[in-house]
Amino acid sequence: MAEMLLTADDVRAIADLARLELNDADVAVYQQQLSDILDYFQKLQELDTSHIDPTSAVLPLTNVMRADEAGPALPLDDVLANAPDSDGEQFRVRAVLDGGE
């Protein structure tokens, strides 16, 4: 059993922040799971890390992005192939500023 047991109200508050709807069975499951996670982090807090240099990443950071170079345009039929609605030459979308009608 977890040493730091969250209450059902704690779990419901966390779920509310995450915009999750939980039933009572879910609350009970997450109450135990979240408590176990917090206990594990409490154990990690007890480790002496004073001899370890602070770091923001454990692996060297490299840019894996490709160069931004213009290429040939796709054929119009390919571009519009997966569009939910088009007028044959461009995407058709609902208005978003006047109520969406």
Image (cartoon, rainbow, N blue to C red):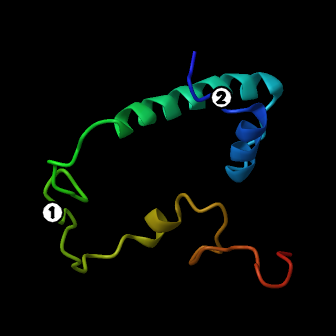
Q: Nearer the viewer, residue 60 or 69?
A: 60
**Distance from Cα at disc 1 to Cα at disc 2:** 37 Å
Q: Residues within 10 Å of mark 1 (few under 14, many from 20)?
A: few
Say which residue appears at 39% left-offset and 31% top-offset: 43
Please say if 28 is above or below 34.
Answer: above
Q: Nearer the viewer, residue 23 or 101?
A: 23
Q: Position of residue 51 (x, y in %)?
A: 14, 48
Say which residue appears at 17% left-offset and 61% top-offset: 61
Q: Position of residue 52 (x, y in %)?
A: 16, 49
Checking the image for residue 62, the label placed there is: 1
Counting residues from the start of the chain, the first of labels 1 and 2 encountered is 2
Q: Position of residue 28 (x, y in %)?
A: 73, 23
Q: Amino acid at mark 1?
A: Thr
Q: Nearer the viewer, residue 43 or 88?
A: 43
Q: Residues within 10 Å of mark 2 (few under 14, many from 20)?
A: some
Q: Which residue is mark 2?
A: 30
Q: Secondary structure at mark 1?
A: loop
Frontmost of labels 1 and 2 is: 2
Q: Which residue appears farthest toward the top when viewing the image? A: 1
- Quadrant of res 11: top right
Say which residue appears at 36% left-offset and 70% top-offset: 74
Q: Which residue appears farthest toward the bottom when viewing the image? A: 98
Checking the image for residue 19, the label placed there is: none
Q: Secondary structure at mark 2?
A: helix
